Amino acid sequence: MLTVSGLHSAILKPASFTVGAGECVAVRGPSGGGKSALLRAVADLDPGRGDVRLNGVAREAMPAPQWRRRVVYVAAESGWWADRVGDHMADPAAAVRLAAALGLPADCPDWPVARLSTGERQRLALVRALVLRPPVLLLDEPTGPLDAGSTTLVEECLRAELARGAAVLLVTHDPAQAERLAVRTLYVEAGRVVADGEVRPCR
């Protein structure tokens, strides 16, 4: 589904890998090693070079906004541009259903963004991405600020996305989470993908 060949940027050394339909690939490595830069380069949010394709179609073959609606990046700290949560949702009804699955009340689209806690922002940023039903999700620490219960709900939601055939590239510092969700791990250090292998069982 997602094919990356020789992708590089000012931070990222040339990287090549694939993520298949219904497959989660974890991205791990030290802080500052280039994990977020890798996701941003795939999403075409930072200047870079290389060949990135979705189902064989080159990224350059479609307008950037269209690519970013199909290969959706969710940052560790997502931006919000309107005052009301619901104004960020492409499909309000779907947003309410997804929010409920993540433990949020039905009236959350009416909330002002300013009232959101860090964990609520993170879950609603994921909702904002999921309502698009993208073929590819690029997730940067989606459960970083969440408690154990909310993390479980997010992981259940991601399993549902994988079951419908989405490809997921997941930055996580939690080896147990990588083992629960991913089939492979990309290890990124000093801007370089230094290893691509199976998830290692937790000890």
Image: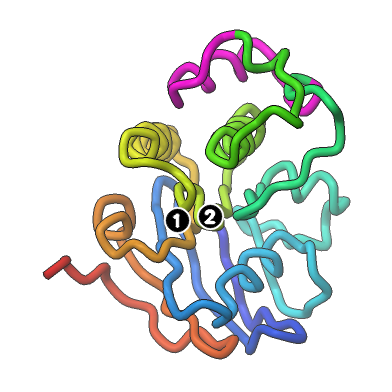
At x 77% / y 80%, what residue is drawn?
A: 49
Number of residues whose C-alpha sits closer than 10 Å to that of mark 1, classed few (under 14), some (14–19) or many (20 or more): some
Label 1 near label 2: C-beta < 8 Å? Answer: yes
At x 53% / y 39%, what residue is drawn?
A: 119
Q: Which residues are magenta?
A: 87-106
Number of residues whose C-alpha sits closer than 10 Å to that of mark 2, classed few (under 14), some (14–19) or many (20 or more): some
Q: Is residue 80 left or right of residue 188?
A: right
Q: Is residue 1 visible?
A: yes
Secondary structure state at the residue bearing disc 2: loop
At x 66% / y 84%, what residue is drawn?
A: 12
**Amino acid type, mark 1:** Gly
User: Is 137 a magenta residue?
Assistant: no
Residue 122, quarter of picture: top right
**Amino acid type, mark 2:** Met
**Can you say which quadrant of the picture contains the C terminus?**
bottom left
Q: Is residue 110 left or right of residue 105?
A: right
At x 83% / y 52%, what residue is drawn?
A: 62
Residue that badge 2 annotates: 1
In this orientation, which residue lies closer to the viewer: 186 or 36?
36
Residue that badge 1 annotates: 20
Name the spot of residue 169 as percent of width and height, x first.
50, 58
- Cα separation, mark 2 vs mark 1, equals 5 Å
User: Is 93 a magenta residue?
Assistant: yes
Q: Is 84 located above or below residue 55 in the figure?
A: above
